[in-house]
Image (spheres, grey):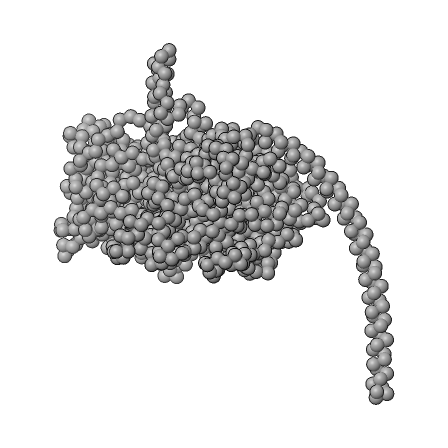
Amino acid sequence: MFSFKNEKDYVDLSLELSDETDWRVETLRTFNHHLDITALAVDSISGLFAVGTSKGNIYLYGSPGVECRLSITDPPGTKVRLLQFAISAFKLLCVDDHDRMHIWDLAAAGKPRLQKIVNFPHPVNCITASPAHTHAFVALSNGEIKTYDLLCLRTSSYVIPNLWTAYEEKRMACGSPLPSVPGSSIIVDIFEHPRALDILFVTHAGGVVLYDLKQRCASRTFELVNPPGAPGGAGFHAPDILTHRRPAVTAVAIHPSGHVLCVGYADGSLAFWALDDEDRPLLVRTLDSVDDEDVNTVDTSRLEIAQANPHGANFPPREPIFKLTWSGFPNSSDPRGGETVLTVLGGLLHGYASGITALLFPALAPPAPPPPSPRSSAQAIAQHPLHPKMRSAMRASLLPHDVYTYPTLGVPQDFLLIPHSSPHFGGAWDPQAILLLSDSGMDSFGETRSVEACEFPPPSFGVSGAQAAHPALKPLGQEANAEGEDPQTVLDQDLAETLQLLSLSRDPGLLGLPFSLSGVLGSTLVRVDKGAYEILVRDEREGAVDAMLPVKGGIAWVEDPEGQMKLMRYQPHRLLITYHPDYTVRFQDLSPQLLISKSPDAPLQSAFPALLPALTIELTPLLIDPLLGLVQSTDSSSTTSKTKADEPEGDPTIAYVKFAVESHECVTVLSNGAVVLHRLGSANVTSGYIPEPKKLFDEELIHLQHLRVRSGLRFQPFLGIKPGNGHVSACAISDIGFLAVAYSSGTLLIIDLRGPKVILRRSHSEKSVLHRHGERDPIVSLSWTVCGLSSEPAPSIRLLGTVASGATTLYTIVRSGDGAWNVSASPHSLEAAQRPLPGGSVVLDAKTGARVLASRSGLAAALRAGQHDAAENDLREAHRHTLWVSTGAKGARCVADLTGERIAKADWSNKAGAVLQTEVIERNGGSVLVAFTEHQEALVYSLPFLELLLTLQLPPSFALPFTTDDSGDIVSHTLHPSGLARFTYLYTLFGTRRTSPYAAPVIDLTYGRGTIPPHPQPVSLTPTSVISSWLGYLAGQGAMTGDQVDTLLAGPDRPVPPPTAAQRPIARPAPAQAMSEGTSSLTATAGSMSSGVGDLYNRLGNALAERGQMLGDLQESFDSLEQGSKKMVSQAKNLAAQQSAKRWFNF
C-alpha cells in the first residue's frame, strides 16, 4: 500500500466505519429453490398448496409469510412420490419411495405434527381422499384397495379385491376369444363419483371398473377394444392395425354431471363413455382428430391407401395420455352444467411443441328420449341402453369448440388446477389457475424442473365468469338498444364490449409464485430512494395488478422480543431484479419494511421477497419475431426465428441486467450479444396512440416502441441492439439518456437514447492510440459520471472505458449549438488497475464520499456550466473535487479528479486469495472500499488512502455469483450444475439489531379455514323430471352421506377419537357465486347435515360409554393374564426341579 505526503489535503471518508464494532456479518435469510419437484397438491378450503421433492422435503405455502417445510427423516432424503390433502380431516398424506404413507396433522399448533407412518404389505400405486368423509383409499400393486381411517389412524376392515382379475376370469369363462393382457390388473388410479360417494371408479391398466361400495360388487366395466382396421391412437400405419388391440389405460376423468367418462390410453387416444353404456364408447379420438372423426371405427378407403403405401407417411409416435381433469363452472342454470374444459397432459406427437392441452366442450344437454314403443322388447332395450338421439346429442357435446395449449419450458411432467373454493369434483370445479410442472430445459438429463402458474381457463374460452366480475359488460354478440338510451351510455357499452373482446383474445397471463418456486439464473440488487420506490410499487398498492397465485391460507407474524422491528422502517428500500430461463425479468421487493408485523392481530401483509408483477419484463415476444433479429447468431448475419419447442443448444439466455434507478430504464443483455432496453410506463393504458414502426439510421439499432406488451405490464420495449459484434463485454446505462455497450470484438457503441442514435462507434478494425501494435482489446469495464477534471474544472458527462490491461479511455459527451449530443473528438487516456473487477470503477465526491453518477442533478450542473454567460462563481460552485477508485485483480488505485494525482495504491494480500468483486459501501456518512475474496473474506479499506482497516469473515455459503448494493447488503446464489440457483442467501455486513425481524415467522395454518360445502347431488341426464339414467335411482333414493360411507368402511365399532382442543377454524366469507345446484337439494342436504351433527354427538357419547366398558373388560383381561402368568411361572419352577432331580439320579 502506497500513500503520499499531501494526504492532509484530502478528507478521510472512513472515520465513521473504522471501528470493528460497527461491522457484523450476518445471514439474514436463506431461500431454497425447488429444482426437484415430484408432486403437487392443493387444499381449496384452507387455501394451502404443497410441493414434494425428490430429497424428501415437503413445502407448504399459503398467505404472505406462510411457508413451512416438512421432511421425511427415516431415512433422510427419501423421494416424495404421492402427495394429497385429506381436506375433511385437515391432514396431509404423503407416500414416499419406500411405499410408506406419512400422515401430518395440519391443525396442530405451530408446525404440522407427524402423526403416523403406515406400512402396507405391497407397494402403493395411488391414493385418494374425499372431502366428504375421513377415509383414504390406498391402491396396492397386487390390485387390492385398502381403506385407511384418518381419524382413528388405523387400517379399516373394508378391502376391495382385484376387480380386473375377477372380470377377466368371468370373461374367459364366457368364452371370450381375446387373451388376457399381462399387467392389465395394475391399478392406475382410483377416484369417487363426483355426485355419488358410494360409487368408486377403479382404473386398471386393462379398463375402468365402476364399483358399488354398498353392494360390494362391480356394476360397470369399460374396456376399449380397437377392431382390426381401426387406426386407434397409433394411426393407419401401425404394424398391428389388422388385429384386435386393447390399449392400456393411463388416465381417467369424469364429466361434472357424472354421466360421461373420459379415458386416456397409452396410444394417445381418448375414449368417451356414457355411464349407461359400457359396450360401446360414444367417441374415440386423438387431440388432433378432425371434426367427429372416430379412431375406433374402420375407414376402408384410408386403410387401403395406407396398406398400399406403408412408408408413405412417416409420422412420429404419439405420447400416451398421462393425466386428465374435467372442469365445470357455475356458468349455467341447468343442473347438468354449462360448458366444460378437459385438460390433457400428453397425447401430442413426439418432436412437436410440448405443453398442456385444454379443450372447451359445449354443454351436455341431450334431449329427453322418446317413450319406448310398445313393440320394443325388454331385451332390445337392454341391448341399447341409450336411445340413438341421446347418443347423438351426447356425441355432439364432445366436439370441442376451442383448443388451447399451455406452453412449457421443457417436457411437461404434471399439472395442478387451483379451484376457487370447492374441493369437490376432484378439485377441478371452477378452477382459477393452473400450475405447470415441467423440465427446466437447462440440463440434458431432465434433472431440474420448473413450475409456472397461469390463468385458467384460457380467456379465449370465455367461461371464467367475466360477466360476474364486470356486470356492466353484456354478453358478446348482444346488440345494444339505442332507442331511448343516452348516446354516452351506448358509447360506453360499445367500448366495454370492445375491451371484453380484447380480453378474450389474449393468452392466459402468468401468475406470480413464491420466490422459492422460481428458477433463477442470476440477479441484481439495487437500493432505491423513497420517491423511486413509490413510483415502482404504485400499481401493486392500488390493486391494479392481481397476478399472484391465489392461495391465502393461514397467517404468519414475526415475534420481536428485542424490539428491532421499529428500526426496520428506517432501512432503505431494496429491489432484487432476477432473470429466469423463460426469458423474463422480474422485480422482487426486498425492502425490510415488508417484515414489519407484531402479532396475529397484525400479521405479515406481504411475502418476502414480494414479487412486483406489473414490473415483469417478457422478452419472448421480441425474440421470436423474425423481423427483429434478436436471436441472430453472433457469427451469422441471417435472422432465424425459433420457438421454445425447437430451440437447439446454444440459444441465447439472459446474461445480466442493468437498471437505472432515476430514469427507470432496464437493460437486458443476452448471451448472444443482443441488448434490449425497456422503459417504465403505465399498466392501465388500454388504448391510445401507438407509434408507427420507425426505421433508424443505425443498422445495429431496432426501434421497439411500437410493440405492445401484455395487459397489466408497465415496462415497454424501447430499443434493441442486434447481435453481430460478439458477446457483450461491458454495458453501462445512465439516468440521463445515454447507453454504452462494449463487445468482445473490441467494438464500442455509445447511444443517445433521445434519437435513438449512435453517437460513437469504435470498431475493432480501428487503430488505438493506447496500444503500440495497433490492436484494440475489448473494453471490460464501463461507467458513467458527471464531473470535472483536474485540467477542466467544469463538470461534463463522462464515460470511463477500461480494457484488461488497465488502459482507460475517458470519453466526454458535449452538446453542440443545435442541441445535439456528440462525443468529444479528443478523449483522454488514463490508467486504472489492471484486470478490472466488477464494481471496480467508481467516482466519489472527495468531501462527502457520495457517488458521483450521471444523474439528473449532474446533468443540470453540466448544462449550467456549459452556458457561455455562466458566472465565474457559478462555475466555481459547480466544480467539486472527485475521487476515482479503480480496482483490479491485483490491487486498487485512487486518483484525484480522474486526470489528477494518484492519492494511494494498494495491493491485495496473497493470504486473502483472489479478489472476486469490490464495492464502495456508504453508511452513517462514511465510505469504505470492500473487497470480497475467494476465501469467504471481506477486506475493508479506507478511502481515499486505501489502508486496510479490518478483515471480515463471511459465511461458508458465500460464493459467486453475488450482487451487492452500496449499503452493505449482499445477495449470493449457490448454483446447480444446470446454471439455476439452488440456494439464494441474503447477507448483511451490518447485522447489529437487524436479525430478529428476518427470523422464520410463526405460522397458524388453521386461520381463515373455510367450511366444506355440501357434496353435490346427482342430476338427471335428461331435462325431464323423470330420471331414466342409470344414476337416477341415486337421486330418487338419496345418495350416501360421508358419515354413512365412514360407517360402511370402518364398521359399526369404529372407535372415534375424542374431539381435540384445537382452535376452531375461522370461516371465510362464501364466494359470490356458488355451484349451480338446486335449492331443494341444498335444503335437504342442510337438513341432513344438521341431523348428522346430532347423530355424531350421540355416537361420540355412545363411543365414550363403550370405551369405559372396554377399559373395564381390558382390566379384567389383564387380571386374568396376571393369574395365568403366575401359574405358568409356578409350573415352570416345578418342571425345572423335576429335570434337575432326574439328572442327579442319572435318569
Instruction: Give x and y (percent) for residue 1124.
Output: 83, 65
Instruction: Give x and y (percent) for residue 98.
Output: 54, 60
Give the vertical position of 146 relative to 999 (above or below).
below
Q: What is the tally of numbered marks visible in this picture? A: 0
Residue lying farthest top? Answer: 484
Q: In the image, 637: left or right of 1022?
A: left
- Residue positioned 16% across, 55% down in the render: 775
Q: In the image, 255: left or right of 1116?
A: left
Task: Place residue 394 in its image quadrant.
Answer: top left
Quadrant of the frame with the N terminus: bottom left
Quadrant of the frame with the C terminus: bottom right
Task: Place residue 170 in its image quadrant.
Answer: bottom right
Q: In the image, 779: left or right of 326?
A: left
- Residue positioned 59% across, 44% down in the render: 198
Instruction: Give x and y (percent) for residue 936.
Output: 42, 56
- Residue positioned 33% across, 56% down in the render: 238
Along the line of sight, which residue is nearer the eye, 39 or 527?
39
Along the line of sight, which residue is nearer the eye, 438 or 1124?
1124
Along the line of sight, which residue is nearer the eye, 92 or 948?
92
Residue lying farthest bottom? Answer: 1146
Instruction: Give x and y (percent) for residue 777.
Output: 20, 53
Along the line of sight, which residue is nearer the eye, 123 or 507?
123
Q: Is residue 756 visible?
A: yes
Q: Can residue 526 be seen in this view?
A: no
